[in-house]
């Protein structure tokens, strides 16, 4: 499994498992748990969730999936900005830990920038680190100005989870270069644009050259960056297996040029997008 190095020096799998929109239908629960367990078996041991997903039900599902295997996974969850006061961050994390059935998170993220002062959230993160309830902290959906403000307050941030895929390339202009120079990876959510990229004829052409699928090409394109994780959601075992094979796919200069023509990179700064 390809890995990505965090600023702490720890390495984590480049390809992980997202859980947004999981645990929303009881009829899919068994398949989703089986998918997460299959992902861990395949080395996709980075699992991302959040208190917001399904009102906490996604965390409960992840906890069931990793029961008995907690030490095998790098577990990520997120606090809502409305909860992210110093004390509220601690309470939210403790609730997430109960739902996940664990005593610690490997990484805890502020889900997006809210109106509360960042310094108060950082106080909560520091208290959780000191108590051993989280090992690392980071952020999500932070633009370049946000990251500069954050790192001026505290240099311990480990990642920035952002919307990044072939059709959402705005971060390449300034945010990704900043992350590369800071030695801090990004974590790309919706790397296949929730499936909307899969109808692209160019993706299909590139996939055919490699006996691959369009989804594998879209994931391999994100993973071409040495400082990027991708966390696609896959609700079935077959889907997880398909995604896992993207790690082995190496796109050629011709492939990348064709994808650039179909999905042009930004030629100037763009606002950071969210889904």
Image: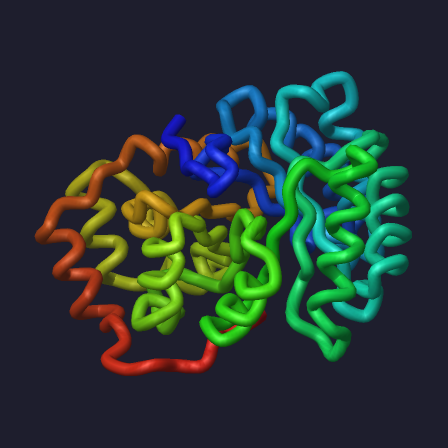
Q: Is residue 101 above or below residue 271?
A: above
Spot occupied by residue 227 in the image (x, y as percentages of width and height): 37, 47
Q: Is residue 228 above or below residue 274?
A: above
Q: For residue 252, say whether it is visible.
A: yes
Disc tally is: 0
Spot occupied by residue 258 in the image (x, y as percentages of width and height): 15, 61
Asked whether 74 or 155 is in front, the reply is 155
Spot occupied by residue 146 in the image (x, y as percentages of width and height): 54, 72
Q: Is residue 47 above or below residue 262?
A: above
**Given the current orientation, which residue lies at the most extreme top position?**
68
Tell me: 129 left or right of 88.
left
Q: Quadrant of the N terminus?
A: top left
Q: Is residue 18 above or below residue 189?
A: above
- Who's the residue at 57% across and 35% down the image? 46
- Who's the residue at 76% across and 17% down the image? 68
- Who's the residue at 45% across and 81% down the image? 271
Q: Quadrant of the C terminus?
A: bottom right
Tell me: 144 left or right of 178.
right
Colour mapping: rainbow
Q: Quadrant of residue 60?
A: top right
- Who's the residue at 51% across and 61% down the image? 162
Tell me: 191 left or right of 67.
left
Q: For residue 239, say whether it is visible.
A: no
Spot occupied by residue 64 in the image (x, y as percentages of width and height): 80, 30
Asked whether 198 or 129 is in front, the reply is 129
Asked whether 39 or 125 is in front, the reply is 125
Q: Quadrant of residue 140?
A: bottom right
């Amino acid at each position: 499994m390809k890995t990505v190095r965090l600023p702490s020096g720890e390495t984590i799998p480049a390809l992980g498992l997202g859980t947004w929109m999981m645990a929303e239908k009881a009829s899919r629960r068994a398949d989703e748990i089986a998918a997460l367990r299959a992902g861990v078996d395949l080395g996709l041991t980075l699992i991302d969730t959040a208190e917001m997903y399904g009102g906490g039900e996604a965390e409960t599902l992840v906890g069931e999936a990793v029961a008995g295997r907690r030490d095998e996974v790098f577990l990520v969850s997120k606090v809502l900005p409305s909860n992210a006061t110093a004390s509220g961050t601690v309470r939210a994390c403790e609730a997430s830990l109960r739902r996940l059935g664990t005593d610690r998170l490997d990484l805890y993220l502020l889900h997006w920038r809210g109106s509360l002062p960042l310094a108060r959230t950082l106080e909560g993160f520091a208290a959780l680190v000191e108590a051993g309830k989280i090992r690392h902290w980071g952020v999500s959906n932070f633009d370049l100005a946000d990251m500069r403000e954050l790192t001026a307050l505290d240099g311990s941030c480990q990642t920035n989870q952002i919307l990044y895929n072939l059709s959402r390339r705005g971060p390449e202009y300034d945010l990704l270069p900043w992350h590369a120079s800071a030695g801090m990876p990004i974590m790309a959510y919706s790397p296949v644009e929730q499936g909307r990229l899969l109808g692209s004829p160019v993706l299909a052409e590139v996939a055919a050259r490699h006996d691959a699928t369009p989804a594998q090409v879209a994931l391999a394109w994100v993973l071409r960056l040495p400082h990027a994780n991708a966390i696609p959601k896959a609700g079935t075992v077959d889907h997880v297996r398909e995604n896992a094979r993207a790690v082995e796919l190496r796109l050629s200069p011709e492939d990348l040029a064709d994808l650039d023509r179909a999905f042009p990179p930004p030629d100037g700064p763009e606002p950071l997008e969210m889904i």
